[in-house]
Image (cartoon, rainbow, N blue to C red):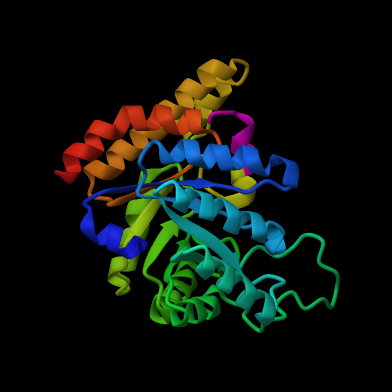
């Protein structure tokens, strides 16, 4: 099923994200994780793509396993280090596996890139270039967005302009990078509406269940960490069980507030931990059910 049809049919959607392993021997374990997540009845499960396409075959394989278990899959695809031939091969593989949804990304610049290397051999240097190709191939296409601005954008206005290019290229929905202050999202959604961007926006929620995650999250996304979350991480950093419970509670509070304020899509970055997703769903399943009635 195409995700845009799911989003248009529900008042609130719920989705998860998993990432493929770096090594072949861990693939079966991640497949089991994905299957376990399907038992929670999400609207879809997203499967990420390694830097420079390093896990491209795993992404397709895991997405296929999700589809086999009756849940819609969203496969990520990037431009970085992809030739046109490679993109064609991957797209054909997705079609063969009956995967109808793709998240189009430029991809992060590879850390091992050497001076003078052409990291965009396909000629696709922006996600919008990939969006156009995928739409021609009949996919439902998602795009990424950053409530606090893309780290490489010169300004928030420039960031919104780039999003408009994606939408004009055919993006059906957007998924946000993780954020920890809901007011950041509300401000961002207002700017999108004011700019004429009206596609569905899914709110990306990252449960912080390990205090060391905070530093990594700031490095990855430049996200603002509210004082309340910093205090939680500081207070419970030496108690893993308490930190997990507190992190789940914080993510739950975010989700309840988002749904109460009319946000129609919740996307949980599970970090391949089904137990965390289960705990959050146990906290909000009746809220989502009541909202969709």
Q: Is residue 211 magenta?
A: yes
Q: Is residue 70 magenta?
A: no
Image height of 124 relative to 24, above or below: below
Q: Residue at x 23, y 53 (%)?
A: 10
| Image quadrant containing the C terminus | top left
Q: Residue at x 60, y 45 (%)?
A: 218
The answer to whether residue 147 is visible is: no
Q: Which residues are magenta?
A: 209-216
281 with respect to 235 (left or right): left
19 with respect to 190 (left or right): right
- Looking at this view, is 81 or 148 the one in front? 81
| Residue 247 horizontal/vertical position (percent) | 48, 28
- Looking at this view, is 132 or 228 the one in front? 132
| Residue 256 horizontal/vertical position (percent) | 29, 36
| Image quadrant containing the N terminus | bottom left
| Residue 27 horizontal/vertical position (percent) | 66, 44
The answer to whether residue 153 is visible is: yes
């Amino acid at each position: 099923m195409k995700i845009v049809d799911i989003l248009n049919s529900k008042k609130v959607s719920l989705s998860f994200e998993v990432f493929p392993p770096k090594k072949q021997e861990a693939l079966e374990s991640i497949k089991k994780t994905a299957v376990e997540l399907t038992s929670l009845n999400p609207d879809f499960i997203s499967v990420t793509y390694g830097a420079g396409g390093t896990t491209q075959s795993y992404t397709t394989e895991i997405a296929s396993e999700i589809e086999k278990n009756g849940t819609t899959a969203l496969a990520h695809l990037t431009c970085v280090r992809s030739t046109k031939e490679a993109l064609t091969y991957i797209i054909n593989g997705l079609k063969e596996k009956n995967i109808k949804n793709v998240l189009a990304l430029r991809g992060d610049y590879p850390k091992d890139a050497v001076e003078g290397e052409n990291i965009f051999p396909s000629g696709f240097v922006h996600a919008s270039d990939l969006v156009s190709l995928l739409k021609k191939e009949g996919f439902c296409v998602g795009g990424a967005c950053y409530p606090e601005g893309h780290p490489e954008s010169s300004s928030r206005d420039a960031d919104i302009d780039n999003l408009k290019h994606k939408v004009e290229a055919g993006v059906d929905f957007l998924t946000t990078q993780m954020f920890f202050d809901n007011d950041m999202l509300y401000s961002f959604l207002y700017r999108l509406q004011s700019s004429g961007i009206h596609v569905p926006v899914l709110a990306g929620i990252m449960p912080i269940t390990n205090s060391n995650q905070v530093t990594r999250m700031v490095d990855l996304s430049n996200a603002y960490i509210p004082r309340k979350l910093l205090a939680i991480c500081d207070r419970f950093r030496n108690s893993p069980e308490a930190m997990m419970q507190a992190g789940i509670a914080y993510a739950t509070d975010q989700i309840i507030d988002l749904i109460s304020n009319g946000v129609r899509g919740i996307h949980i970055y599970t970090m391949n931990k089904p137990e965390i997703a289960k705990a959050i769903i146990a906290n909000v399943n009746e809220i989502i059910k009541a909202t969709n009635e």
